[in-house]
Amino acid sequence: MRVLAAMSGGVDSAVAAARLRDAGHEVTGVHLALAAKPATMREGARGCCSVEDSRDARRCADVLDIPFYVWDLAARFRDDVVEPFVAEYAAGRTPNPCLRCNEKIKFSAVLERARALGFDAVGTGHYARLADGVLRRAVDPDKDQSYVLGVLRPDQLAGAVFPLGDSPKGEVRAEAAARGLVVADKPDSHDICFIPSGDTRGFLADRIDEAPGVMVDPSGAVVGAHRGVQEFTVGQRHGLGLRRPAPDGRPRYVLGLEPVSRTVRVGPVEELDVTGLTGTSPVWLVDPPREALDCVVQVRAHGGLAPATVRVVGDGVEVALGEPLRGVAPGQAAVFYRPDVDGDVVLGSATIAATSR
């Protein structure tokens, strides 16, 4: 099989490429240049799109003795990931750009180009298992990335290969060292790759005009002011800028964002509990359920799991939670897993549009 190995310049994608080569596939490495103006060097463990990362990917390809190319997808990445990310925050939602990068870039733009060039699949360093179209959690629960892959359609998964799903991270690093790959001890990237400073608020402030408004408590009383709803996300506790404590002295959290009225609702932590949600743009890896489907839903990349019942309603879904979840933000993904002994199997996903108590 001819496989295009997406090599970010990190340890995971390098070992994935090595395993694909050892499995007898005809492997070509490609680094995706996604930043319009890549920084010369990484900032600690942040980001994954710097000149340094491109060079590390090339050095690993040289050690593996596979062809290597750099594809400039900065314009596509800007249009399909960065600009929607900004628009979602401006609309009071909390997007996950990693999901959209997988959906729109790695397994859309890259896969389309790979197939046009005669490749059979795209291989990545994601921690997930895939066999016969069935997407499952990785064996390493701390590194599992099935959640951020749960938005992929069956035809996209048909062109994907994930060689690391059966391995713990420590084993992958040890293998990289044994192979002489310079990235064996390289820190993992964190946060959002196109905001290497980690300052999401500052990034958004440069792209969204200030729209000052008020912060209100559950009674409707004004307790503070803000410069724009894009500075907040549901569940946030720190950085609210409130000078007056709650009457009971307890901390306040962001409960909801209303961009039209420029209102940020804040209150006690128990007000974050939700028992239901609605979702749009569902993607199913199984036949869409005609009746209520019992499952386990995950609403964040790490944590946020609860038993649930999903119903298809029109073009969307309604999800009733078996137990409350906190800090569920519209704009994030809800990924559905089987509820039985095979609970690591992904059934489908949807984008959270609204929540209910």
Image (tube, rainbow, N blue to C red):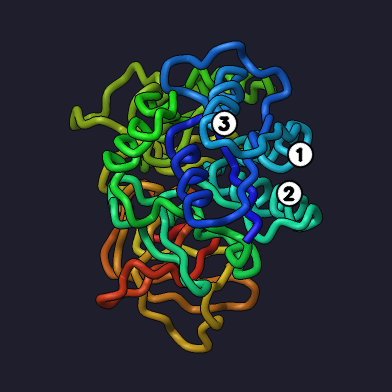
In the rendered image, residue 66, in percent from the top left (x then y), is placed at 61, 39
| Residue underneath mark 1 | 76
Q: Quadrant of the N terminus?
A: bottom right
| Residue underneath mark 3 | 230
Question: Disc 1 marks which amino acid?
Answer: Arg
Q: Residues within 10 Å of mark 2 (few under 14, many from 20)?
A: some
In the rendered image, residue 84, in percent from the top left (x then y), is placed at 68, 41
Question: Disc 2 marks which amino acid?
Answer: Ala
Residue 102 vertical placement versus 82 (above, below): below
| Residue underneath mark 2 | 109
* Total marks in image: 3
Image mark for residue 267: none
Q: Residues within 10 Å of mark 1 (few under 14, many from 20)?
A: some
Q: Quadrant of residue 120?
A: bottom right
Question: Which residue is at the front of the view, 85 or 347?
Answer: 347
Question: Disc 3 marks which amino acid?
Answer: Gln
Secondary structure type for disc 3: helix
Q: Residues within 10 Å of mark 3 (few under 14, many from 20)?
A: many
Secondary structure type for disc 1: helix
At a point 47% along the width and 88% down the height, the residue shown is 291
